[in-house]
Structures are given as structure tokens and as C-alpha cells.
Image (cartoon, rainbow, N blue to C red):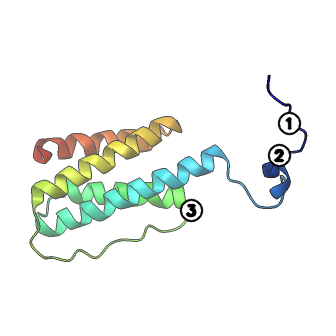
Amino acid sequence: MYEPIRTKSVHSTMAGPSDFPHRTREEELDIQLAGHLAALLAVTDELRALAPSADLDAATERLAEQVTRLRGGSAVRAVPTGEARDLSALHQRAHTLAGRALVVAASRADTAAAILAAERMDAHACCAA
């Protein structure tokens, strides 16, 4: 009914297995998790600038530690703009980023990052609604 394929696939001849570097699944998850936590750190820094609290101070330190651990270097900190922004929208953004970080942390079985992300989700849940 169908004619068999007679030629090799063009995809297999385009690049051999060692033509370019590949990352492992764990490396990809590390990159994703570090990205989500770094974004959460930036939003948390912005919240700290608008409404300082000891909880946000502690959260930024813990987030910076996790980003540093995952990236192997120091965490880049955002400089808050200081302009008036909607706190509810920032809390919603932080809640969403913490949720994404939690999913990736759970996927890579990173307990410390998962606990931190879950705590940040709880902290921002009350204000995100």
C-alpha cells in the first residue's frame, strides 16, 4: 500500500552526535529553575522597595543563595525602580513565578528550592487575589 522509504533521513545526516554540545535534562532543569528563581528575586526586590518587611528581606537572601547555587556564580540583583506600582499585581507575578519554580524544583527533586518556592507561593497568595 505504501512505498518503503529508500533514502536515509536528512535529519540524521545534518549533524552527527558530536557536532554540537548537548545539555542533559538535569542541566536544562537547573537553567530553568535558576531563571524562575532569578525572576522571583527581581519581583521580590521590587516589592521590598515599595513595602519593606523582614519577610521580604529574608526571602531575597534565600532566593539569592539558591540562584547562586544553581548558576555557580553570584546572583544578579535588580535595582528597583522605586516608581509606584500596583502591589497586588506584583504579588500576583511573584505567586506565578514561585509556582513555576516549584514545578521545576519538584521535577528535578530539589527539595530546598521546592520548599522555598512553596513558602513564597504561600506568602504571596494572600495578596495576589
Residue 116 appears in view = no
Residue at the location (20% across, 77% down)?
81
Residue at the location (39% across, 55% down)?
37
For mark 3, does the 10 Å Cα neighbourhood hold few (<14), some (14 to 19), or many (20 or more) residues? Answer: few
What numbered label is drawn on residue 72?
A: 3
Q: Which quarter of the figure has residue 6?
A: top right
What numbered label is drawn on residue 98?
A: none
Q: How far apart are labels 1 and 2 at the CA level?
A: 9 Å
Left/right of residue 111 with respect to residue 43 in the rendered view? right
Instruction: Tell me if residue 36 comes above or below residue 122 in the rendering.
Output: below
Image coordinates of residue 109 in percent, x first then y, are 52, 35
Q: Amino acid at mark 3?
A: Gly
The quarter of the rendered structure image containing the N terminus is top right
In front: label 2 or label 3: 2
What numbered label is drawn on residue 9?
A: 2
In front: label 1 or label 3: 1
Left/right of residue 73 with respect to residue 122 in the rendered view? right
Spot the residue most to the top. 1
Image coordinates of residue 64 in percent, x first then y, are 39, 61
In front: label 1 or label 2: 1
Please, what secondary structure does the residue beneath circle 1 have?
Answer: loop
Please, what secondary structure does the residue beneath circle 2 have?
Answer: loop
Q: How far apart are labels 1 and 3 at the CA level?
A: 47 Å
Q: How far apart are labels 2 and 3 at the CA level?
A: 40 Å
Q: Which residue is mark 1?
A: 5
Residues 66 and 84: in front is 84
> Who comes first in sequence, dot 2 or dot 3?
2
Q: Amino acid at mark 2?
A: Ser
Q: Amino acid at mark 1?
A: Ile
> Who comes first in sequence, dot 1 or dot 3?
1
